[in-house]
Image (tube, rainbow, N blue to C red):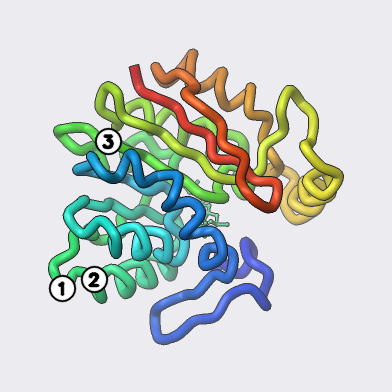
């Protein structure tokens, strides 16, 4: 299964259908704190590559009225997302069933279009653990489905102007490329170029996060 390739075996646990990623558990509150100003006023949120479902579960816990649309490439992980969602939906939260979204598949994007447009499209730890074509398609897809003024937010490690922020990020990049040559820490300026030139978005702000990560906020024009 894909999540075996993406996570260190010691880093995840599965209880019934609910998969537990240690990294998602560590960063979910930090990410949520940065998203709060957007979530306060949001109606519809799409997550690309929801993984286990822990992020959406955490966000919905504090924002029960927001309609969250999880998506995931891996079928086993979609079951995990739905299992987490079920816990909250039983008490009136609004997490939709996880949809299959291969970011490079245009039909999949058509299927997640929300008529009113999304207020937020977010993705965590996906851009570097997938080929560049996927990263590019995620940015383009976000531009397609966001409402005007909506936000696209990407969490993870990035190079700035082709330079690694730390030696450990350079080593992490080598480890990723060793696992799959098409993976790797992305250059923020290359992501920004796609956002600006192909997705109708502008870079809003970049927030330094712990463990050499960033949260990058784009706004749809
Ligand atoms: C390391 S996991 C991150 C999962 C979750 N967001 C988290 O932070 O725990 C990488 C994710 O990349 C996603 N991914 C890989 N290829 C993809 C593709 N072609 N389209 C969309 N997502 C993809 C996988 O589905 C997987 O969930």
Specify whether residue 14 is in view.
yes
Dot 2, crowdedness within 10 Å: few (<14), some or many (≥20)? some
Disc 2 is placed on an element classified as helix
Tag of residue 88: 2
Chain-order first, disc 3 or disc 2 = 2
Q: Measured from the top left, where is residue 162 in percent x and y?
A: 76, 26
View extreme (top): residue: 197
Q: Is residue 150 left or right of residue 18?
A: left
**Split into 4 quadrants, where in the image is the N terminus?**
bottom right
Q: Is residue 161 left or right of residue 41?
A: right
CA distance for labels 2 and 1: 5 Å
Of the numbered discs in the image, which one, if any, rests on residue 152? none
Q: Please report whichever mark, 1 or 3, sits nearer to the chain's N-terminal start.
A: 1
The one nearer the camera, 66 or 130, is 66
Residue highlighted by disc 3: 119
Q: Which residue is mark 1?
A: 91
Callouts 2 and 1 close, C-beta under 8 Å: yes
């Amino acid at each position: 299964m894909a999540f075996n390739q993406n996570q260190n075996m010691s880093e995840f646990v599965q209880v019934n259908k609910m998969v537990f990623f240690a990294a998602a558990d560590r960063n979910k509150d930090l990410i949520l704190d940065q998203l709060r100003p957007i979530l306060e006023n949001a109606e519809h949120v799409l997550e690309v590559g929801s993984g286990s479902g822990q992020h959406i579960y955490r966000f919905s816990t504090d924002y029960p009225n927001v309609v969250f649309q999880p998506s995931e490439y891996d079928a086993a992980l979609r079951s995990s997302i739905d299992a987490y969602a079920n816990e909250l939906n039983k008490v009136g939260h609004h997490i939709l069933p996880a949809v299959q979204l291969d970011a490079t598949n245009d039909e999949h994007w058509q299927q997640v279009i929300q008529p009113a447009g999304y207020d937020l499209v977010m993705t965590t730890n996906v851009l570097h653990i997938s080929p560049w074509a996927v990263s590019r398609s995620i940015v383009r897809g976000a531009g397609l489905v966001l409402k005007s003024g909506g936000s696209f937010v990407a969490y993870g490690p990035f190079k700035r102007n082709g330079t690694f922020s730390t030696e450990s990020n350079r080593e992490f990049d080598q480890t990723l490329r060793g696992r799959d040559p098409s993976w790797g820490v992305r250059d923020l300026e290359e992501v920004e170029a796609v956002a600006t030139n192909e997705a109708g978005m502008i870079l809003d702000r970049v927030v330094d996060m712990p463990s050499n990560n960033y949260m990058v906020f784009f706004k749809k024009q």
